[in-house]
Amino acid sequence: MRYSNLDSWVEPDANDCWIWLGPLNEDGYGVTSYNTAHVAAYITWVGPIPPGMEVHHKCEVRNCLNPDHLEAVTHQDNTRYSRGWTKKGDVWFCKFKHEMTFENTRWKGRFVECRECHNERKRQSRR
Ligand SMILES: [Zn+2]
Ligand SMILES: [Zn+2]
C-alpha cells in the first residue's frame, strides 16, 4: 500500500534521518494503519519489497523513514544486522570488527557465530 501524504508525517533531524512523528510500537518502530512506517516508506518512495526481503535501517534509527537510509535485505542479513554485524562490500564483520571469513564463522544449526568472539568468551570463562 502506497501512501500519498507520508512526507507530512516526518521531520528531518541533524543526521538527515527523517523522524516519524506518528505512533511507535513497543520495539521503537513507527507504525501506520497497515505496515510499520519504514516499510510503508520503502514501498511509497522506493518501490515494492522483493519477495522474502525485509527492510533494514542502514542508519540504525528505527523510526527513520529516509528512503536513502533504507535497504531491502534478506531475513538472514537482517538478523545479522540486528546482532550488530556490519557489511562492507560482500564481507561481513562481527560487532567486534572481526572479519567473518568462512574459517571464522561457526554454524550452530541456523545460528551464525563469530569464532574469534566465541574463543574469546571461552578464554574469559576459564579464568
Ligand atoms: Zn536514518
Ligand atoms: Zn567477533
Image: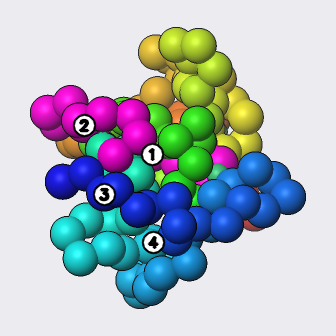
**Looking at the image, do the residues carrying marks 1 and 4 touch, with CB atoms under 8 Å apart?**
no
Q: Circle 4: is it few (<14), some (14-19), or many (20+) Cα within 10 Å?
A: some
Image-based side of 68 in relation to 28, left or right: right
**Assess mark 4: CB under 8 A from ligand 1?**
no
**Residue linked to disc 1:** 56
Q: Is residue 53 visible?
A: no
Amino acid at pointer 3: Tyr
**Assess mark 1: CB under 8 A from ligand 1?**
no
**Residue linked to disc 2:** 49
Q: Identify the mark nearer the N-term, 1 or 4.
A: 4
Q: In this rendering, is residue 91 above or below 48?
A: above
Give the CA separation, mark 2 to mark 4: 18 Å
Q: Secondary structure at mark 2?
A: loop
Give the CA separation, mark 1 to mark 4: 12 Å
Q: Secondary structure at mark 4?
A: loop
Q: Is residue 29 visible?
A: yes
**Residue linked to disc 4:** 29
| Residue under the point 58% across and 36% down | 68
**Residue linked to disc 3:** 3
**Looking at the image, do the residues carrying marks 3 and 1 touch, with CB atoms under 8 Å apart?**
no
Q: Identify the mark nearer the N-term, 1 or 2.
A: 2
Question: Residue 106: x percent and y percent?
Answer: 42, 33
Query: Is 44 or 77 nearer to us in this picture?
Result: 44
**Assess mark 2: CB under 8 A from ligand 1?**
no
